[in-house]
Amino acid sequence: MKFFAGAAVLLLLFALAPFASVPAGHRGVMTTFGNPSDQVLSEGIHFRVPLAQKLNLVNVSIQKGEGEGDAASRDLQTVHTRIALNYHVKPEGAVSVFRDLGNEPGERIIIPAVQEAVKAVTARFTAEELIAKRTDVRDQIIAQLRERLARHAIVVDEFSIVNFNFSKSFNDAIEAKTTAEQLKLKAERDLQRIEVEAKQRVAQARAEAESLAIQRQQVTPELIRLREMENQRMAIDKWDGKLPNVAGGAVPFINVK
């Protein structure tokens, strides 16, 4: 009989669950008939009054959220932005998150804060600047998020802009501009090459002209006669001593003994 009585007590205690535990990465908030306590319970086992008290868990580990939305740039281009955010709840702010945000910080405050920050910062830049100054855009969004979320015991760990998407007409305009710039650079390089080649030809022609001028200055009557004598001597050296075979007419050479 005592055995059954003890077993019944154990079953009753198990059913009433006078103890509750807080797992790793969480903090506990005890409510008494729905009224949250101001005390943040750390990881471990905690006593509760059965039926009257309930232990509620608040996640304080780093969580990741992704989202996307549309905004307008300073030059009124529609920008579709996709972002990724890592955040965590401050352990000491678990009661505030549970009480003020219904333990749903993502839905209650993080998503609206991200949308507002993205729209506000995007409106400061033109569409082209959003691409060229992506780091500045990200840093300004992070600054706004940290300032707003810190008031609700939420810490921004990382924020990144996954992608910017623009309208097809804007993308076509960017592509056309890029192509025009590439053609312009090619034309400038070709012009520079042509100018260099022209300068090289001018320099070569000038050098050849100067060389000819120097040679003309060195040509004198004495040099001409000397060249004629050298040519005659070379012709005599090559002659084999035979007179040309001429049919009729006088012998072109006179044999002087």
Image (tube, grey):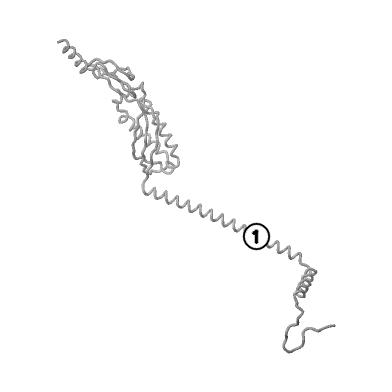
Q: Residue furthest bottom?
A: 248
Residue 240 left/right relative to 57: right
| Dot 1 amino acid type | Gln
Residue drawn at 76 percent across, 64 percent down: 218
| 123 and 141: which is toward the camera | 141
Question: Which residue is nearer to you in this view: 26 or 241?
Answer: 241
Q: Is residue 95 above or below residue 68?
A: above
Q: Which image quarter holds the C terminus?
A: bottom right
- Residue 7 at x, y = what percent? 18, 14
Furthest-top residue in this view: 2
- Residue sitting nearer the eye, 46 or 198: 46
**Which residue of the protein is positioned furthest toward the right in this rendering?**
257
The spot of residue 253 in percent (x, y) is: 79, 83
Give the mark count.
1
Horizontal and vertical percent position of residue 202: 63, 59
The quarter in which the N terminus is drawn is: top left
**Which corner quadrant of the image does residue 11 belong to?**
top left
Please, is residue 71 above or below residue 104 in the view? below
User: Residue 41 at x, y = what percent?
Assistant: 32, 18
Residue 108 occupies which quadrant of the picture?
top left
Query: In percent of the image, x 23 and y 17: which residue is there?
Result: 17
On the picture, is 73 further left or further right than 7? right
Q: Nearer the viewer, residue 252 or 38?
A: 252
Residue at the spot x=29%, y=16% of the render? 46
The residue under label 1 is: 204
Q: How would you rate the neighbour count of disc 1 (Cα within 10 Å): few for under 14, some for 14-19, many for 20 or more?
A: few
- Residue 20 is drawn in which quadrant? top left
Decide if residue 106 is on the left or right side of residue 222. left
Q: Residue at x 80, y 69 (%)?
A: 222
In the structure shown, which secondary structural element does the residue marked by tag 1 occupy?
helix
User: Is 163 placed left or right of 207 in the picture?
Assistant: left
